[in-house]
Image: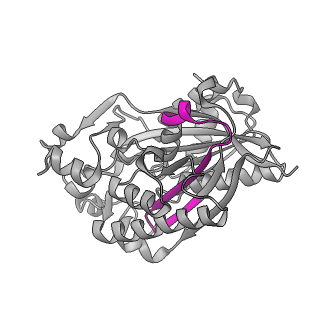
Amino acid sequence: MKITAAISGVGAYVPDYVLTNQELEGLVDTTDEWILSRTGIKERHILKGEGQGTSVMGVKAVENLLAKTGVAAADIDLLICATTTPDLVFPATANIISAAVGATKAFSFDMQAACSGFMYALATGAQFIATGTYKKVVVVGADKMSSIIDYTDRSTCIIFGDGAGAVLLEPNHEGLGLLDQELHSDGNGEQYLHQKAGGSRRPPSAETVANREHYVHQEGAAVFKFAVKNMADVAAQVSERNGLTPESIDWLVPHQANKRIIDATAHRVGIGPEKVMLNIHRYGNTTNGTIPLCLADYEQQLRKGDNLIIAAFGGGFTWGALYLKWAYDGASRN
């Protein structure tokens, strides 16, 4: 039978420090009610400490994954890290994570597609399984968004948090796992959501730092409009192409950017809130961490054979959806 790539385990990690809406009230002109009504966010976790980068959270998520699945780090064939906030320009954060967990055999690299990165990386890792090239692929989604957020900018500082999640992909011969995908990008969206400096176009300088150009720049109205339409449409497209009805979809796993975008996507697919994975109120937008953190939070409720639609949207613009049939009973995992 055809080989498919199935998720056989999930791991997660969020930092201890919790940044509440009440604390943000002391930093910018906002209120808990204003933030909650517009985004659905109550709190977000922040990685504190000198020299603490994205890899710190990625390592913790992978270690959690390996402990739950009983897989040895040395048996990992490939590790992909989806991140927008790498520890360094080079080497890849995936390389740093692999070394730290002892994945000495693993070929590893980073994937950068903003908030869609984990979904892109999951689709990419699945190809190595489906072709028979590798048997164990770890996909990590991790971001320290607090490192590129301006905490004097109300439009962005209320949204983002830090966190990481990881999944293990293994071959499946039962028709479970990743079954379909629809991935897109449009570079014309750059102007609406980007980081102005820090790359080769505008390398770091005293001027770029003084002008606060190393933070996320977002034009909220344009991003919201594009995200609502495209994330919802592609989720519906994948569902319809695979003959999935609202009744046969067990879970929608949406990128946790804004609760209003999540609600619009669920409405477009035609499913109720009881089938939507939601944890934005606890973590905010952790960029590449949102989808694996959802899978980790809801793992105990997942059953073998469940139909999942994963959908995401990111800056640049990037967006897409995956159809995944879950491969194990989550209640069997601690």
Which image quadrant: the C terminus? Answer: top right
Q: Is residue 190 above or below residue 6?
A: below
Q: How many marks?
A: 0
The range drawn in magenta is 296-321
Q: How is the image coloured?
A: one colour
Residue at the image position 40 percent from the left and 35 percent from the top: 51
Q: Is residue 64 above or below residue 113?
A: above
The furthest residue to the bottom: 188
Task: Tell me if residue 209 can be seen.
Answer: yes
Location of residue 114 in the rendering, given as x and y in whole percent from the top left corner: 47, 58
The furthest residue to the right: 1
The reply to whether the magenta stretch includes residue 320 is: yes
Location of residue 250 in the rendering, given as x and y in whole percent from the top left corner: 56, 46
Residue at the image position 46 percent from the left and 56 percent from the top: 115
* Figure quadrant of residue 282: top left
Which one is nearer the viewer's eye here, 172 or 153? 172
Q: Is residue 121 left or right of residue 104?
A: left
* Figure quadrant of residue 266: bottom left
Location of residue 265 in the rendering, given as x and y in whole percent from the top left corner: 44, 60
Q: Is residue 26 left or right of residue 274?
A: left
Residue at the image position 43 percent from the left and 70 percent from the top: 229
The reply to whether the magenta stretch includes residue 249 is: no
Which one is nearer the viewer's eye here, 235 or 13? 235
Q: Is residue 270 above or below residue 135?
A: below
Task: Tell me if residue 87 can be seen.
Answer: no
The furthest residue to the front: 247
Residue at the image position 50 percent from the left and 36 percent from the top: 298
Which one is nearer the viewer's eye here, 122 or 15? 122
Location of residue 153 in the rendering, given as x and y in whole percent from the top left corner: 21, 56
